[in-house]
Amino acid sequence: MQIVRVIFICVVATSCLAETIRPQVSDTALDDALNDKRFIQRQLKCALGEAPCDPVGKRLKTLAPLVLRGACPQCTPQETKQIQRTLSYVQRNFPQQWAKIVKQYAG
């Protein structure tokens, strides 16, 4: 299950450093990550400052403003599509946390 967590952060919080090489993430792996609701809730709480952050959460907090604004120039088209899919999932399944994240990071 740890690999799913690593994959999730690669999709959601894609590194914005041009020299960083990121592994490709399959759509199946993304599905697995999105189905781990406890993991997603922990990352959302971290992003909102409601709980301590693990390394995944720290990266998410750093990159959330860029991702929410749609500005990730180093993202591949596949990563962009997967990020959009992930954000849509969070918006549909965690509407209260989504509203807080948008308020906190996109404003």
Image (cartoon, rainbow, N blue to C red):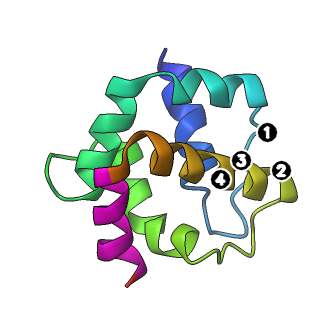
Q: Is residue 12 found left or right of 60 in the rendered image?
A: right
Few, some or many C-alpha atoms within 10 Å of disc 1 (few <14, some 14-19, many ≥20)? few
Measuring 79% from the left and 39% from the top, which residue is drawn there? 24
Disc assigned to residue 65: none
Do the residues bearing badges 4 and 3 touch, measured as CB atoms within 8 Å? yes
Question: Mark 1 highlights which residue?
Answer: 24
Image height of 103 relative to 62, above or below: below
At mark 3, the secondary structure is helix
**Which residue lies under the disc numbered 4?**
83
Residue 82 circle label: 3
Q: CA distance from mark 3 to mark 1?
A: 11 Å
Give the structural element (helix, strand or loop) at label 1. Answer: loop
Residue at 28% across, 37% down: 42
Residue 56 % position (x, y): 41, 44
Residue range (magenta) = 96-106
For image coordinates 60% across by 34% down, the residue present is 7
Q: Are marks 1 and 2 in contact (CB under 8 Å)?
A: yes
Q: Earlier in the sequence, mark 4 or mark 2?
A: 2
